[in-house]
Amino acid sequence: MAKKIITVSRQFGSGGRTIAKELAKRLDYDYYDKEIIESVAEKTGFSEQFIAEKGERSPGKTIFSYGFDTGSMMPGVMYGMSANDYIWTEQSKFIRQIADSGKPCVIVGRSADYILREYDDVLNAFICADMEFRKKRVVEIYGETDVKPEKRIADKDKRRALNHKFFTDLEWGFAPNYDICLNSGKIGLERCVDILEELAR
């Protein structure tokens, strides 16, 4: 059976976003990545930067967990939820709306694999790669900073893993939690797209 929805989770620097975008193009599927952040920002009143950061961090216990965002207006009614929970709830609603629309799509990150776990026509992929491959891509794409690329990668992956664990109680990147895991550093980004396209069809 053809898969109408493909979720792509990825290690930082593995090329997962590039793979997902090319896959959507080949299949002529809608593509959702930053579009999710934009929609949630519009709904909640939080800034896109705030939502992007909260979406990849484990909820904390500081006052900033409860809705204060110096870069945006205060959201409306949060029903007593923390900012993290409120953003997760609205993000989940939007992702389900995408799925319920019936239009084939590729969704990057945002724990979409878990949010759509009860849907039958979903293919969940995880993209990984060795550190040397990822270090090279991070520097090529995002440039050099004062922080070494391996630390940037480790910090980013740790935040994603903690956030995923908090909301799903599942281990981010643990192979049995996905339908397929691909090592882009070993087989290349193009081959990853080929494999996912074949599986989707």
Image (cartoon, rainbow, N blue to C red):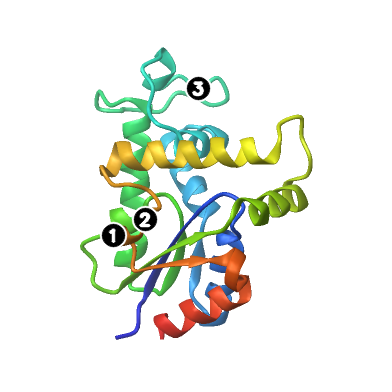
Q: Secondary structure at mark 3?
A: loop
Task: For the residues labelled 2 and 1, say whether their Cβ atoms are less than 8 Å apart.
Answer: yes
Q: Which residue is mark 2?
A: 112
Q: Kindly tell me whether residue 21 is visible in this rendering.
A: no
Q: CA distance from mark 3 to mark 2?
A: 25 Å
Q: CA distance from mark 2 to mark 1?
A: 6 Å
Q: Is residue 34 left or right of residue 86?
A: right
Q: Which mark is residue 185?
A: none
Q: Nearer the viewer, residue 1 or 186?
A: 186
Dot 1 amino acid type: Leu
Position of residue 171 relative to residue 158, above or below, is: below
Residue 100 or 176: which is nearer the viewer? Answer: 176
Horizontally, is 171 left or right of 105 in the view?
left
Q: In 3D space, how far apart are the residues under numbered discs 1 and 3 (Cα atoms)? A: 29 Å
- On screen, 146 above or below 34? above
Marker count (numbered): 3
- In the image, what residue type sits under mark 2? Ala
Q: Which mark is residue 116?
A: 1
| Residue at 32% in and 49% down | 92
Q: x, y (%) of residue 64?
A: 44, 18
- Measured as percent of width and height from the top left, residue 136 is found at 72, 53
Residue drawn where x is 55% and y is 76% of the image = 193
- The extreme top residue here reads 63
Secondary structure, mark 2, is helix
Query: What residue is pinned by disc 3?
Result: 69
Place residue 186 in its image quadrant. bottom right
| Residue 75 higher or lower than 133, as above or below | above
- Residue type pointed to by label 3: Asp
Q: Tags 1 and 3 in contact by the CB under 8 Å rule?
A: no
